[in-house]
Each structure stands twice: as structure tokens, then as C-alpha cells.
Amino acid sequence: MKLKNIIYTTTLTALMIAAVTGCSKKRFDINANPNDVTDVSVTPSVLLPGALQYTSSTIASEWWFIDWWMGHGARSGSYQSFNEEETYKFTNDFHVGIWNQLYYNATNYNLMVNKAIETGAGTYEAIGRIMKSHCFQILVDVYGNVPYSEAFKGTATATPKYDKGVDVYKGIFADLDAAITLLNDADATDPAKNPDIATADLVFAGNLTRWKQFANTLRLRMLVHLYNGTATQTIAPGIDVAAQVAKIYDPATNNVGFLGAGQSAHLNPGFSGTKPQPYYRFWNTTEAGSGSQRDWARASEYAIDYYTWDGDLRINRFYVAPSGGHNGIPFGTPSSNTAPLGDALSSVRGPGLSPGGANSRAWILTSVESLFLQAEARQRGIITTGPTAFALLTSAIQESLVWLTVRPLPTTAVPNPPADDAYAVARANAYISGNATYPDVDYNAAPLGAGLPAGGLYTILQQKWFALNSIAPYEIWTDWRRTGIVYGVGGGFVAGPTISVDPGTPAGAKIPIRLYYPQNEYNYNPTNVAAEGTINVTTSKIFWDLN
């Protein structure tokens, strides 16, 4: 075990109702015309708040199974097994909410873009283009080829074609270009043409620079996804990386950098006990205060043991320890194993993601992820100016503890001490120095043995795994798929992530590298989805996956 010298310490339409409340049970049909479910009174200022909140809700609630696969979460042994998540015997409607909600959200943003064009509301149009791009970036990374160019044409194109993933990426880059152009246009961004932008924009209150930085960060996320491997690297073809990077740093049109420390894409329209933060609502209590929503959620044995191995203070922000201290559950433990694997174990409802309880801010894209993306991009030579990869990694670890509100240990005098950014940064620095010579924390560390990774890129990716637990599971999954990283081994810990130990798991089961298309696509768009061929979730790769 490592030596650790670390101290722990409005309602206008059915569409808008669903968007504002955050969880729709209605099946989304990508062939539906969004204009059919609105009326002429719907304006960009009405659409934007609900769409942004819906984005944050989707991020908070749809990805827990990825947390399991990537080694962060598990199910209490006293609860019945989750069949597909733990046995890898998948159907076409496995977590269909991801497809439905992302397309549903993209429809709102697309409608907002169209409404903004009608009135010349350039700020709203730019935000709509950026956020629609955010939806489609995730769709491609989960499903590969998807309907894009014909997705919102309604009855004019009743069965939209599937665009290749690389072409969707190119379309997203073009939309980001258009958004930047609009954000640089003083006439298009005139407040008189963008009424109520400061209040309708729940994320940046109409701050044009922040939206440029968001667009740059999203573009960088996509460029980083093109890079495969750790010890050696290969780059997925089809995208001119240098040209895309040049747009980020164009001194005439952009050059504002990326989201930095304290600049997360957050929102809080007034979350409360009756209108709780989406993550808190999903994992803790409903608006009616009906108690825990998902008592089956627990910390995985792998995560608890690994955070403990490193003396990582974030364990107490991601997980709540029972009276006997932190414990974890092997992923996929049979439900008959009720002791000691029952309700007395840690859960993933740690206070770091809801530091203010139901009143906490929700998130879309965090400053923590942005700094990790910059660190990897600098390490790989995607970007060649600014802070070094080592400096960016250090900032990312510091920002992770700040974002999670790591705070001093409680005392009798101060039972719940306030968050202190300086304290969190100091603890981050102590964590790094306390793990010197271990490549999972120490960027400059040599390999611990023959065939094991050194620091550098491995450290960046491993630390991203520690930092984005439950925050952006889809990004951790993407890292694992495109790089082939084996978590743990660089720090002298057990190789991970581990797969389910459920007895129903077939021999040779593997963590999927994509999801199936929903059954509704085979029912209502059969010719186009059939043209994609037979999908195998363990072998049908996303275009950027060269491993």
C-alpha cells in the first residue's frame, strides 16, 4: 500500500413542460416536426432556460451504468440484480433514455435556433448552435452514425438518413464556427435583439466570452477524442486537426481560450427542496421529499479501495461513509449476498456533487474536465502554446478538489466548516507530493515495473478517472475506449475496470464500446437503420476508436 502523509479531511407546450421539469416519459420521435408542438408565442428567451436545465438533468441522471462499468459504482447486495448492466445481455432498448433525451433536447435547441434566426437574435442562435452540438457530440460518441442532417425536417423527410459519425463531427465544427461568428457580431449580439438574455441564459448570463470558451472547450473535447493510445498514439482520419486548432487560436475572431478554473458551465435557476437540483433529485429525494430515490446505489469495491490506496480526499466528496468507515461492493454481486453487502455501505450520493443539498448548482461541462482536456491536448501536441501539460494537470487536480468543495475536517467548534478554496488547493498539493513516484498521481514518475506505464499521459487519464466520477461518466468511458488505458496498474493497484461478477454474466463478457440503436428506429426508420448493418456492442466501433 502507498505511504500516505495526507490529512483527510411557462408552461406553453407539452414540450416545454417536459423540458422544464427535467424528465420526460414521452417517446421522442426524431421524425416529429418540432414546430407542430409549439405556438407562435414561443420565443428563444422562453425556450433557452428549460433546454439548459434539461441538458443538466440528462447529464445527472442517465449515466449511472457507465459509472458501474468504469469502476465507480455498484448495486447493494440486498437488491435484485440489474440484468443487462450486470450480465451484458443487451436489448435494443437498453437505456433508451439517452437517445430519447438527447434528441429531445437537440430539438429544443434547433427550434431555438430557428426562432432566433427569424428575429436576428444572434446570441440566442449562437447558444442554440453550441448546445445542439453538445447533444450531437454525445450521441455520436455513444451510438456512432446517427440521423443529423435530416433529423429535424419533419414530414419533409419522414425517415431521416444516418450520417457517418465523422460527418456529424464536421457538421458540429461548422455549427461552432457559425456560433463564434455570431458571438463576434456586435449587431447580432445587440441586447435589444436578444431580450432577457441575462436571465434566460442560466449558465453564463449572456457572457459572450464564456460562450466562446465553452465552444472552444467542446471543440477541444472532440479533437482529443480523435487521439488513441497511451504509450504510442494514432489519430482517427477525416478531421483536419490543425485547422480546427487554428480556429480556437485565431487572434481576429476567437483566441479567448477555454473554460478555466472557476468557469464551469453551471446553472442554478433557484433549486430548492420543492425544485431540487437534478442530481440530488435523481439520487436523493423528489420534490415531495419522498426519501431516497435509488437505495440500490452503492460505491464499488474497486473505487473505494483505490481512492483509499492513494489517500485521496475526494473519497469523502463522492461517497458517504457508514459509521464503520468506507466499504465497497464488487460490481455485480448476486442479490442473495445480503451481508455484509447490504444497505450499510457507501453510496454514490456524496456531498461533493450536491454541496448545498437540493439547492446545489447543476452542471453541464465543468472547469475540471476542461483543464484535463487541455492537459491531454498539450501532452499530445494538439495545442502547443500556454501552460505545460504538467502545469495544466496540477491545475486540474487542484480545481477538482475546489469544485468538490473539499473542506477542513469538522471539529466540535465547527461541525460543518465552510468550503475554502485555498484549503482545497493546499490539500491537492499535499496529495500530489504524498504520492510521489507513483505514476497515477505523479506526472514525472518512472514506471513501477517492467511493462507498466510511466507518468505523463497515463497520469492525466488516471487522474481524470478520479476526478470525473459521476460527473461525466461518458467521458471516462470514451477515454477507456480510445486509449485502451488499464486503470490502477500505473499506481501499483489492481488492474481495472473490473467487469460484473454476476453469475449470469457469460464467459468472455466485455464492457461495451457503444450502445445499440433503439428499437423504435427499427420500427419506424427501418431502411436507414438497417443500412448500418448488424450492430455488435463489443466490436462495432465509433469512428474515432482505433484500438
Image (spheres, rainbow, N blue to C red):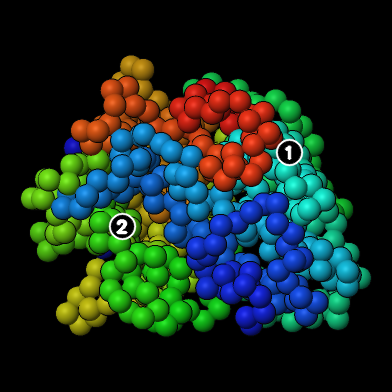
Nearer mark to the viewer, of 1 and 2: 1
Q: Is residue 145 visible?
A: no
Residue located beneath label 2 in the image: 348
Q: Quadrant of the N terminus?
A: top left
Which residue is drawn at the image coordinates 52% and 73% (left, top)? Answer: 21
In the depicted structure, whether residue 480 falls above or below residue 354: above
- Residue at 20% in and 53% down: 79
Q: Which mark is residue 161?
A: 1
Q: Please rate how many residues cluster around mark 1, counting C-alpha atoms within 10 Å: few if below 14, some from 14 to 19, many from 20.
A: some
What's under tag 2, amino acid-wise?
Val
Identified at 33% across, 79% down, the residue is: 289
Q: Secondary structure at mark 2?
A: loop
Q: Residue at x 59, y 42 (%)?
A: 523
Q: In front here: 213 or 515? A: 515
1 and 2 marks in contact (CB < 8 Å): no
> Quadrant of residue 470 in the image?
bottom left
- Residue 337 x, y percent position in the rendering: 11, 45
- Say what amino acid the circle numbered 1 marks: Lys
Q: Position of residue 536 (x, y in %)?
A: 49, 27
For residue 112, side relative to residue 228 (left or right): right
* Residue ranking furthest to the front: 523
| In this rendering, position of residue 140 left or right of residue 156 | left
Along the line of sight, which residue is nearer the eye, 181 or 453?
181
